[in-house]
Image (cartoon, rainbow, N blue to C red):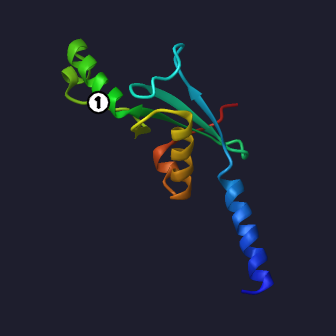
Amino acid sequence: MTENHVQELRLSREKLRMAFSFNLIIRTGINGIDRENDNVDVEVHFPSGETYVATFFTLTNIQTLFEKNRMTGECKNGWYFQCPDMIIVEELTEGVVRETVQDLLENGEFEHAFLKIEETE
């Protein structure tokens, strides 16, 4: 490998790292996060100014919501549950959210999982 190829590879890695640079805002309730049975709205902010959102659920939380809906009559008495931009995780922590976002970015699936928020003026 020539020195030019090594330099290009370094530049490519730096561009990739910068492309995946982001800040997270995790919207929790007043009681914080129940890592096993909860859902949270997540905002991902990029240096370009773009913002994306999704809702992270634990598997246990989805089951809890089904049970609640059976009692309240919502979602045809608990027959279904839906949420746009839903991401299901086994455990809900900041680390899991951050690593999930990173993996979605690296695999080119981020824009399928998150909704881009258009800026209003």
Q: Quadrant of residue 16?
A: bottom right
What residue is pinned by disc 1?
81
Q: Is residue 49 above or below residue 81?
A: below
Query: How many tags in the picture?
Result: 1
Coordinates of residue 99 in the picture (x, y in percent): 54, 46
Q: Nearer the viewer, residue 118 or 35?
A: 35
Q: Residue at x 47, y 32 (%)?
A: 92
Q: Residue at x 54, y 13 (%)?
A: 30
Amino acid type assigned to the residue bearing label 1 in the image: Phe
The image quadrant where one finds the N terminus is: bottom right
In-image side of 91 versus 8 (left or right): left
In the rendered image, the quadrant that contains the C terminus is top right
Residue, x 57% and y 49% (percent of image)? Answer: 102
Residue 46 versus residue 57: which sits nearer the camera?
A: 57
User: Residue 114, position in %: x, y?
Assistant: 50, 42
Assess disc 1: are there few (<14), some (14-19) or many (≥20) residues with their C-alpha within 10 Å of its C-alpha: few
Provide the secondary structure element on which disc 1 rests: loop
| Closer to the camera in the image, 107 or 92 | 92
